[in-house]
Image (cartoon, rainbow, N blue to C red):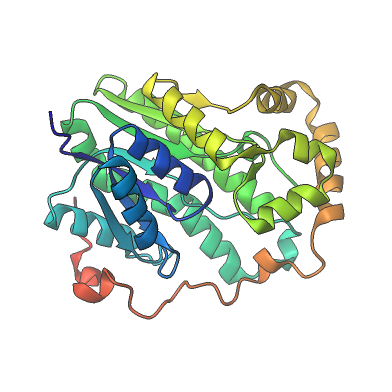
């Protein structure tokens, strides 16, 4: 039987998102992939089509634009792409003192890590419920299980992801919609993350998993209808430590570790040239989305 449903994945051009797309394609899932312009998404989508014979649609835009979630929904509806699985993967992290983070950087990180997830979930929820076999996978982090000095915005936003996912799990448990929350530990997603892990020493390197490992565990466990997905026994121990080690001791240790390895000029904190206001992206330029914000 031909699969007429789609899996929507945000942040699909690199890191965990790219690996999730490959895992889903190899599991015969049609895909809607979302990523920034000039991120190699089109070439990657063609590769997945050729290799796995699935349908792969792409939406190229900047998810930090407040109108981006509406644009994705409107495009999907116009093209009759019926979504039964939503993977809210896009996110951004940084290491550094909160005081050094610019206002724009903080807003950008909060938009990507929280607002996009909530917006897309709300917009696509009816479709997912109507599929009668729907899935929502939200990507949080081990960092969301306890506060992290010098990663304060990141840990707080990832805690939001976990709390939102847990609440939604119970709201939808009788609607044949499975909500899962992926909480990976250190993951080799890009050069900057790998450099940070190297600076943090052997412990971070020991706990670090590849994006492929994380993605394969995530999809397998989600399809097994598991809520909390923590890849690797080492990271399960890390999560447990957050519950049993006295908080003051844990946070002083973590704060000291991250402070020592924070860059003197925080690249992620300055972020003044991030593409928050790109020139018209492909979807927003094709329709007056700003006038379409209404009750869905």
Q: Residue at x 66, y 21 (%)?
A: 233
What is the number of callouts on the image? 0
Query: Is the residue 29 above or below the residue 233 in the image?
Result: below
Q: Residue at x 33, y 78 (%)?
A: 280
Q: Along the line of sight, which residue is nearer the eye, 293 or 278?
A: 278
Horizontal side, residue 4 vs residue 146: left or right: left
Q: Residue 185: x, y in percent? A: 65, 36
Q: Residue 219: x, y in percent? A: 42, 30
Q: Quadrant of the N terminus?
A: top left
Q: Quadrant of residue 202?
A: top right
Q: Along the line of sight, which residue is nearer the eye, 21 or 171?
A: 21
Q: Residue 77: x, y in percent? A: 15, 53
Horizontal side, residue 247 vs residue 22: left or right: right
Q: Residue 11: x, y in percent? A: 44, 53
Q: Residue at x 71, y 60 (%)?
A: 98
Horizontal side, residue 233 vs residue 206: left or right: left
Q: Is residue 148 visible?
A: yes
Q: Quadrant of residue 137?
A: top left
Query: Is the residue 68 above or below the residue 138 in the image?
Result: below
Q: Along the line of sight, which residue is nearer the eye, 275 or 50?
A: 50
Q: Residue at x 25, y 39 (%)?
A: 125
Q: Is residue 150 visible?
A: no
Seen as rendered, the residue at the extreme bottom is 279
């Amino acid at each position: 039987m031909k699969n007429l449903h789609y899996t929507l994945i945000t942040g699909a051009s690199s890191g965990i998102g790219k690996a999730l797309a490959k895992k889903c394609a190899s599991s015969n899932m049609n895909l809607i992939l979302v990523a920034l312009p000039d991120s190699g998404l089109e070439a990657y989508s063609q590769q997945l089509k050729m290799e796995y014979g699935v349908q792969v649609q792409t939406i190229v835009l900047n998810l930090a634009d407040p109108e981006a979630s509406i644009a994705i929904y409107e495009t999907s509806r116009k093209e009759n792409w019926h979504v039964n699985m939503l993977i809210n993967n896009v996110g951004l992290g940084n290491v550094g003192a909160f005081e050094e983070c610019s206002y724009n950087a903080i807003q950008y990180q909060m938009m990507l890590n929280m607002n996009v997830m909530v917006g897309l979930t709300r917009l696509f929820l009816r479709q997912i419920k109507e599929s009668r076999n729907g899935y929502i996978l939200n990507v949080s982090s081990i960092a969301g299980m306890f506060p992290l000095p010098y990663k304060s915005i990141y840990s707080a936003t990832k805690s939001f992801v976990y709390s939102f996912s847990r609440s939604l799990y119970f709201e939808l448990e009788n609607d044949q919609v499975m909500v899962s929350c992926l909480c990976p530990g250190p993951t080799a997603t890009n050069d900057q993350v790998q450099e940070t892990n190297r600076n943090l020493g052997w412990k971070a390197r020991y706990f670090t998993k590849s994006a492929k490992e994380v993605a394969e565990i995530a999809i397998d466990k989600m399809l097994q209808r598991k809520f909390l997905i923590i890849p690797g026994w080492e990271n399960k121990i890390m999560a447990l430590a957050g519950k049993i080690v006295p908080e003051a001791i844990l946070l002083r240790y973590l704060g000291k570790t991250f402070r020592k390895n924070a860059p003197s000029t925080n690249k992620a904190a300055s972020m003044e040239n991030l593409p928050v206001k790109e020139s018209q992206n492909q979807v927003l330029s094709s329709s007056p989305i700003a006038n379409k914000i209404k009750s869905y």
